[in-house]
Amino acid sequence: IKGVYIMLKVIKGHEKSTADVIRTNLRKINRQKCSWLKENSPITPTTDNNHDFYLYDDKKLIGGLLGHIQYGWWHGDCLWIDEEYRGQGYASKLMSQAEIYAEENGLIGIYFETWDFQARPFYEKLGYTVFGELSDCPFGSTFYFMMKKLGTPHQRRLRALALKNGLDDFC
């Protein structure tokens, strides 16, 4: 035992610097166990992998798709379209842009979460499939995990290699 007294501190909220230390230490352990993480994932947490898509009507923000790259996938955090502009194909256009972005960067695919009261049929129409679900999250609702793989592993490796070597026209 290194110390006689260990303090447990419960924080309601978020201490960014402390959370970053915890994430960094876990990432160090994970990188020792997984060669892909060692080669592709930074030790320290970063927001450099955020890649968002926005829609404007003139200067008015009417929608957006927020997300980031994580472990060779693009993770969609939030898709929103202003109520006045819904049903006009804008959400599909944003999803299409995210897929193009993911393909251009050699990513495996796209994943995100949605609830049963949101737009699961919309995503399924675009080729996304459910790979997990949590019932009663929150109580009375179901939370779905959805994904879509892009291209074959060979195609993704070739595209990523070409982009890495500056051969954009190859892609």
Image (cartoon, rainbow, N blue to C red):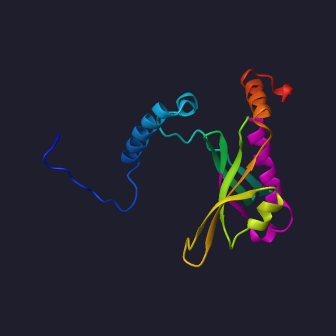
Residue 66: give x, y in percent of width and height.
66, 53
Q: Is residue 60 above or below residue 36?
A: below
Q: Is residue 33 above or below residue 78?
A: above
Given residues 147 and 55, the one toward you in this image is 147
73 with respect to 55 (left or right)? left
Segment tinted magenta in the rendering = 76-105
Point 81% across, 55% down: residue: 127
Point 61% across, 75% down: residue: 141
Q: Residue furthest bottom?
A: 140
Given residues 42 and 142, the one toward you in this image is 142
Q: Is residue 59 visible?
A: no
Q: Which image quadrant: the N terminus? A: top left
Residue 31: give x, y in percent of width and height.
48, 33
Given residues 53 and 102, the one toward you in this image is 102
Residue 98 lies in the magenta stretch: yes
Residue 110: give x, y in percent of width and height.
71, 48
32 with respect to 75 (left or right)? left
Image quarter of residue 163: top right
Point 68% across, 71% down: residue: 116
Q: Is residue 170 above or below residue 88?
A: above
Main structural element of the magenta stretch: helix, strand or loop?
Answer: helix
Image quarter of residue 50: top right
Q: Which image quadrant: the C terminus? A: top right
Residue 114 lies in the magenta stretch: no
Point 78% across, 53% down: residue: 95
